[in-house]
Every structure is written in C-alpha cells, then in structure tokens.
Amino acid sequence: MKLNVKALSIALGIVIGLASLVVGEAAVFTGVGLDYVNIAGPLHPGYSPTPIGALIMAIWMFIYGLIGGALIAAIYNYFEREEKK
C-alpha cells in the first residue's frame, strides 16, 4: 500500500504547526515552555515569546512538517515498491 505524499505532508505540517502554536502561546501567557522558545528562537527568524512570534513559529513548523511528511512518504513508498519486486 502506497502512502499519499501530499496528504501525509499536509497532515504532519498541521499537527506539528498546531503543537508549536500551543507551546508558543503557553510560553507567552503562562511562562510554561519558555525554555523551548529560548532554544528555538535564535534558529528561526521572527520567533519570540509574543503571540505573533508563536504564529511565526507555527508557520516554520508547518513548513518543516510538509518537508518531513514528504520525505517519510517518499522513503516509505520507495521501500514498499522494492519489497514487491
């Protein structure tokens, strides 16, 4: 069974993006997850412990999810095809 590359990419992007948004907003309003912001902030332009910064990080993570999902599906499909031969 082959994986749909587009579907997996979008699904993974949404899940990772939303998770990052939740952590970012928690860091803004409660201080929980502030270590995550301090570690990830310097690596991602625009990310800071603000509501807009959390949204920017969610966009970054969505892009990473798209790329990761595409790679996972492509590698899986490659090996799944090899097994049938």
Image: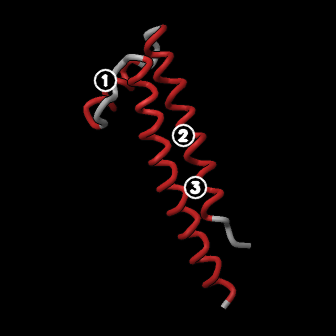
- Evaluate if marks 1 and 2 touch, with contact meaning CB atoms under 8 Å apart: no
Q: Is residue 61 above or below residue 53?
A: below
**Figure quadrant of residue 3:** bottom right
Q: Residue at x 48, y 9 (%)?
A: 29
Q: Is residue 67 above or below residue 50?
A: below
- Evaluate if marks 1 and 3 touch, with contact meaning CB atoms under 8 Å apart: no
Which amino acid type corresponds to the residue marked 3 in the rendered image? Ser
What is the residue that sits farthest to the right in this orientation?
Answer: 1
Which numbered disc, 1 or 2, marks the residue that appears first in the sequence?
Answer: 2
Classify mark 3: residues with Cα within 10 Å, few (<14), some (14-19) or many (20+).
many
Circle 1 residue = 38
Distance (Cα) linking label 1 and label 3: 27 Å
Distance (Cα) linking label 2 and label 3: 11 Å
Distance (Cα) linking label 1 and label 2: 18 Å
Q: Residue at x 39, y 16 (%)?
A: 50
Q: Residue at x 61, y 73 (%)?
A: 77
Which numbered disc, 2 or 3, marks the residue that appears first in the sequence?
Answer: 3
